[in-house]
Image: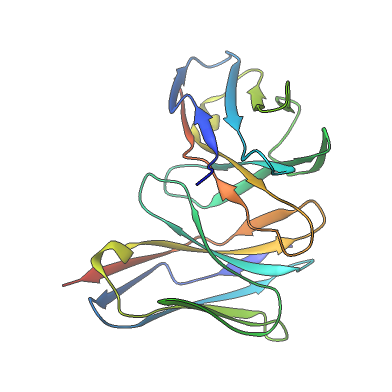
Amino acid sequence: EPEVTQTPSHQVTQMGQEVILRCVPISNHLYFYWYRQILGQKVEFLVSFYNNEISEKSEIFDDQFSVERPDGSNFTLKIRSTKLEDSAMYFCASSEGGRGSYEQYFGPGTRLTVT
Amino acid sequence: GQNIDQPTEMTATEGAIVQINCTYQTSGFNGLFWYQQHAGEAPTFLSYNVLDGLEEKGRFSSFLSRSKGYSYLLLKELQMKDSASYLCAVFKAAGNKLTFGGGTRVLVKP
């Protein structure tokens, strides 16, 4: 069964450093997403992406964040200058799109630890 | 604004039935998703309701009343592996955005 994959599974970085989290969405899916979950808290929407541009972004997704689809398979989230409060699990998700195909399938996540 | 409420925790016995309620007040609504999340893992899709009524999928059923801003997830014939958090999420088609509630941790006891 096709699945969303993410690398790395765990990333440790120092405050102020840039990180890139990588995702490979399910191959026939057209919509891609990033969510984050701070330990013990709820899953929060960051951004949705369709047709090579951002469809919607939350107030969390400020200028420090960017997304890119550099090729036909990868989808990345870049955090330019990490802060302690960016420590969280980051989930990538994808959906087929179109009527009746709204289910979003989540990857296993990247645990980001900022020290 | 967005307000999605579900109980924090529920306990039930193996083989029993548990109903997890979710109420929502959101600006924009195009459907209601339920996800299961085991500790340290990703959410996995369980069900999606766009119209009022009951959707049944094996041991899991989900109900939606749009006029009441209310949904529930019914888990039947509980198994130990059903111990997990269950996340209610409102879907908004503009931006394909999911807004999650805080999740309900279900503990299944023998």
Residue A26, image x and y in percent? 61, 40
Residue extending furthest toward the front? A1
Residue B28 screen position, x and y as percent = 79, 66
Q: Nearer the viewer, residue A56 or A97?
A: A97
- Horizontal and vertical percent position of residue A88: 49, 36
* Quadrant that contains the C terminus of chain A: top left
**Of B61 and B83, the residue lying toward us:** B61
Q: Position of residue A90 (x, y in %)?
A: 54, 36
Q: Which residue is painted at 68% across and 86% down in the image?
A: B68
B3 left or right of A1 in image: right
Q: Is residue A75 above or below residue A14?
A: below
Count of labels shown?
0
* Quadrant of res B74: bottom left
Task: Tell me which corner region of the image, top left, top right, bottom left or bottom right, holds residue B54.
Answer: bottom right
Q: Residue furthest left?
A: B110
Residue drawn 66% across and 56% down?
B98
Q: What is the image's colouring?
A: rainbow
Q: Residue visible at 57% across and 25% down?
A: A21
Q: Is residue A60 left or right of residue B61?
A: right
- Tell me: residue B60, above or below residue A59: below
